[in-house]
Image (cartoon, rainbow, N blue to C red):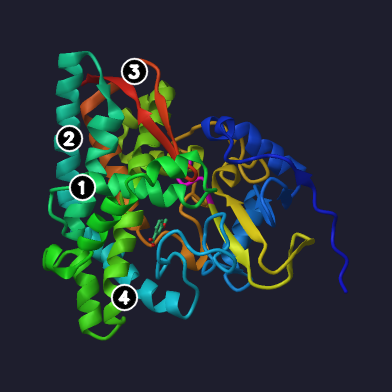
Amino acid sequence: MTETLVTPELDIDPYAEANLIDPYPMHQRIRDAGPVVRLTRYPRLLACARHAEAHAVLSNHVDFISGAGVGLSNFNLEPPFRPKSLILEADPPLHTQNRAVLSRILSPKAVLQIRATFTAVAEAMVERCVAESLAQGSIDAIAALAQPYPLKVFPDAVGLEPEGRENLLLYGDMVFNSMGPRNALLAKSAERMAPVTDWIMRHCQRDHLRPGGFGDQIYQAADAGEIEAAHAPMLVRSFLSAGVDTTVNGIGNALFALAQHPQEYARLHADPGLARSAFEEALRWETATQTFFRTAARDCQIAGHAVAENDKLLCMLASANRDPRRWTDPDRYDITRRASGHIAMGTGIHGCVGQVVARLEGEVVLAALARRVARIEVAGPHTRRLNNTLRALQTLPLRLIPV
Ligand code: OVM
């Protein structure tokens, strides 16, 4: 028998409103309590808030599985909120086969084909934002840019019709809330669960997907026998679940970071080639997907602390991305920092399969802004949309001062 360390316990609720509004003091408390901390408000819950351990858990898909859910709930003990995702909430070998197909559809080579379109849409939308800001004095950067941009380019690439796309935001909000406890936030976003889920599942069918788009390419993979035919609509569902709300908030948070740091914006404006690293640093500094969980498949250890089979492991991505053990001056938003190594898009076999598309969206929006806008100013207080998983802005009033 190996000796294990005494695991510290904290009576912190990560889903308390104050922690959702401002998670950073909580992150520090959990990081400083130890590499693994038992959060006693929920059953069998261990938190990894430091970079090293959060990274280690995500990198070990054998001991720390996804098939029992990547939210707080353990699907070995309670039924899932919706039929399990065949990639997010799956383990090898099922995961491997499905991942290979999505990964090819979203590969760097495939994404090269959409770059020109994504750039043109970003430029046109930034142009409209500038005009609106001049006319009205300010814009809401969430309603005018962070939401409509991903809602146009990604579903277009998947091959969805233009009508009804607001369902994608409602569905994303629900899916990411469902990874937390069954609290008031989940109840509120699940009020329209039936019609929104109906819309989503209908639009996962081949006859709703433009031939040649990312969605149709999943059906082509089924035609070729690479995946089971019955899996195709569920894999399209993964595109529709993960592809919009994540990038909406990634872009929204990047605009927030730049608005809060005029000197960093000035550097970006002087060299729009920094757009990609400005977006990367925003992912680190204000991580859109704050948390993901794993489930222990067996009794094991993390950093000398005992983990029991069926314990849930809370990987605190946003906290890891500001861990002073890993980053110099972690609370500083610095667009030329080497931000790679952050885990805003996870890591390991489940690391974001859409990351090439997500980075493309972030890069081209920030580059279009950098070229067209000399300065951005905060034009009023921002408001938050609280979610159990996402760090999300509801409104972000900005003034855009064009070149
Ligand atoms: C899925 C899915 C849903 C939400 C997030 C995600 C970040 C994947 O349905 O596969 O990845």
CB under 8 Å between discs 3 and 1 = no
249 relative to 143, above or below: below
**Residue that numbered label 3 is attached to:** 377
| Place of residue 170 in the rendered image (x, y in percent of width and height, measured from the top left) | 31, 45
Give the mark nearer the N terminus: 1 vs 2.
2
Task: Note whether 135 is above or below 166 in the view shown.
Answer: above
Which residue is tagged 1? Answer: 165
Give whichever of 390, 185 is nearer the camera. 185
Position of residue 196 measured from the top left corner of the image (x, y, whole percent) = 28, 51
* Label 1 C-beta lies within 8 Å of the nearest ligand 1 atom: no
> How much space separates mark 3 and mark 1, taking CA atoms?
30 Å
**What residue is rendered at 19% in x and 67% in y?**
205
Per the model, the C-alpha gap separating discs 4 and 3 is 47 Å
Q: Which residue is mark 2?
A: 125
Which of the two discs, 3 and 1, labels the residue nearer the N terminus?
1
Disc 3 crowd, CA 10 A, few/some/many (<14, 14-19, 20+): some
At horizontal 68% and vertical 54% (from top left) the residue drawn is 43
Q: Percent x, y for residue 83?
A: 40, 66
User: Does label 4 or label 2 sit earlier along the sequence?
Assistant: 2
Asked whether the residues under the numbered discs 4 and 2 touch, taking CB atoms below 8 Å apart as contact, a structural biologist would say no
Stretch of the chain drawn in magenta: 287-291
